[in-house]
Amino acid sequence: MMLHVPGVLSKDQARALRAKIDAAEWTDGNATSGAQAALAKRNRQLPEESAAAREAGAIVLDALGKNALFFAAALPAKVFPPLFNRYEGGERFDTHVDNAVRLKGDLKLRSDLSATLFLSEPEEYDGGELSVEDTYGVHQVKLPAGDLILYPASSLHHVTPVTRGARVASFFWIQSMVREDAKRALLLQMDLDIQMLARDLGNDHARIVSLTGAYHNLLRMWAEV
């Protein structure tokens, strides 16, 4: 399941975050690559332990914690500290699949979901589409600054060459409480439908109470916490 999560950062927040990281020192993006990805990856990245990366990452995590749609879709158990990359001058990331497990200090995370939070407006650059493959074909994504795309980390994906301007984004991985993508998709649909019905019927309607109970019992059955 791919999901567009709009407005994770407001326009003002996205601009302020960009100002913070644009002034920082960028290095070779292969610092966090596995062996396969290193052959395909041509971009730059903020060093993970730099002050700018830590401050910007904290802003992103705070915004994610306040976003109900992100939580409903990802059902996060663990979130890898956000990283930041930059593509320009023909830089690209050829087709690859993300590592199944990410390690950082004491953190061990199974990458169920990948996320890209766009920090450049689409008109600022040419190329740079995130292209994700699934059984229905290749889906190209280029979102407004502040918007996020969430997709299975098991997907083959690539970033097309940036031929004008700069594509700046945050990217990270999520270990979900519910490992299987199909189960997460079902729970998200139930959650969204319950919210819509509650607006029409009221939260205390007997059917809403019953459906909410079914949702939580499925979550209880499938969740790993």
Image (cartoon, rainbow, N blue to C red):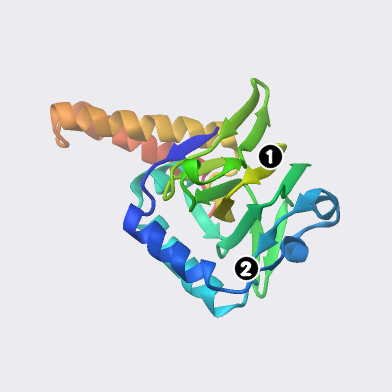
The residue lying at 40 percent from left, 59 percent from top is 15
Q: Is 81 placed left or right of 188 in the picture?
A: right
For badge 2, the amino acid type reads Leu
Q: Is 122 placed left or right of 90 in the picture?
A: left
For badge 1, the amino acid type reads Thr
Q: Note whether residue 164 is visible.
A: yes
The residue pinned by badge 2 equals 46
**Can you say which quadrant of the picture contains the N terminus?**
top right
Q: Secondary structure at mark 1?
A: loop
Residue 26 placed where, x, y %? 65, 69
Residue 71 placed where, x, y %? 41, 48
Residue 45 placed where, x, y %? 65, 63
Residue 145 placed where, x, y %? 44, 48
The residue lying at 72 percent from left, 47 percent from top is 90
The residue lying at 13 percent from left, 33 percent from top is 202
Q: Which mark is residue 160?
A: 1
| Structural distance between the alpha carbons of marks 1 and 2 | 20 Å
Residue nearer the viewer, 194 or 14: 14
Q: In the rendered view, tell whether residue 175 sits above or below residue 95.
A: below
Q: Secondary structure at mark 2?
A: loop
Q: How many numbered marks, from 0 up?
A: 2
The residue lying at 85 percent from left, 51 percent from top is 39
